[in-house]
Image (cartoon, helix red, strand yellow):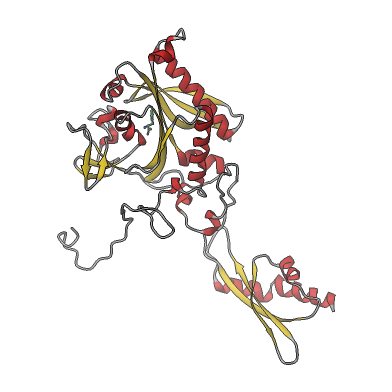
Amino acid sequence: TLLREGYTNFLVTGDVYRRDSIDSTHYPVFHQLHRRDNHPLGILKNAIYEYFDTNYNNQFQKFDDLCPIVTTKMCCCRLVVIDGTLFVQNFDDVLVPADHVSRSYNDTYYVDADTVLRCHTSAHQATLLREGYTNFLVTGDVYRRDSIDSTHYPVFHQMEGVRVFNPSDWNASSMDGTLYAAQELKACLEGLARHLFGAVEMRWVDTYFPFTNPSFELEIYFQEKWLEVLGCGVMEQEILKRGGKTDNVAWAFGLGLERLAMVLFDIPDIRLFWSTDKRFTSQFTKGQLGIKFKPFSKYPPCYKDMSFWINDSFTENNLCEIVRGVQLIDNFTNKKGMTSHCYRITYRSMERSLTDEEINELQMCGKILTQLHHYHSANE
Ligand code: PHE
């Protein structure tokens, strides 16, 4: 394509996808952050799984590896298989109107006229219903064209939940199916919010989605602001009907994992989720939801190596009291039995890139040498 477009010298970098089993050197897609147990998104996904397993007796089927490339159309054959991959529907299947903004080329990544990168996990609702699932969670990466800033990124992660009820579920109550489902949905999601956030203030806001009626948003009060955490509602009857379920009622919800994880882990910038920096990745542990992220500098370090003769009373802790972030990089003893240590000092600012010149000056006339000198004199 690029040759045809006239380019004659070029480099192309991108994520590539190969169906493959997963082991320490093979991975079908490069990222899949929500499938990493030590990543904030994976930890959050597992915490939500835990809530559903406990409260619904392991009834919910979980999907977190469905192909993100989906069709926009309802096909007469219902499912499309291209090169062994199953394609499901992004828009038509969940009743998104032909003129809805989310369909525009400006908001959605189109692969071709009829194929897109899913812009929500709701794209999988109808297919899974048709395949006979009645309680399920779908977690996946979703794609929306957007400018990038600390709270927006064109790829993010959602979890979809769907639960189907039978007439026998609501007949025993005094409610009709829709009211029954709406009430069960709200109780379920309030419980989920408490499971994740502890005692928290919440409110329901009426809203509109093409695929649910009535539709609601759940907001939680967090750090002096109302924060929208999920959309949900009672599934439009037409979607159930297309899935072959004429007598049933269902609820559905979709929540943004990054939104919740930023609050739960104190992560200030959505771009950090993609970081491979150990200072980010090493802060999170499987199963630990409450950990608060400790910010680190995004500016490059400036290293200074410093060596000196040591006496018997010197220990590394003496130096660490004066300057943090030192690392012994060389240890040498001469024929006379005198030992010298070389330490690497890492200088790093939270606000800007440091220059070599300013650090030389800081180090040569600054505190470190004076303090080291004092320390040695005191010990002699
Ligand atoms: N798909 C909706 C979104 O991305 C969320 C949603 C899911 C709303 C299911 C209602 C039911 O905003």
Residue 222 visible in this rendered orientation of the protein: no
Q: Position of residue 90 (x, y in %)?
A: 28, 35
Q: Position of residue 14 (x, y in %)?
A: 32, 57
Q: Is residue 107 left or right of residue 250?
A: left
- Considering every residue shown, the one lying at the far left of the view is 4
Residue 7 against residue 48 in the figure, above or below? below
Q: Which quadrant of the view contains residue 355?
A: bottom right
The residue lying toward the viewer, choosing from 218 and 147, is 218
Q: Position of residue 208 (x, y in %)?
A: 36, 24
- Considering every residue shown, the one lying at the far bottom of the view is 335
Q: Is residue 39 left or right of residue 254?
A: right
Q: Which quadrant of the view contains residue 232?
A: top left
Q: Please tell me which residue is depicted at 47% across the width and 9% down the height of the picture.
A: 173
Residue 366 visible in this rendered orientation of the protein: yes
Q: Please tell me which residue is depicted at 44% across the width and 48% down the height of the picture.
A: 33
Q: Position of residue 378 (x, y in %)?
A: 84, 75
- Quadrant showing the N terminus: bottom left
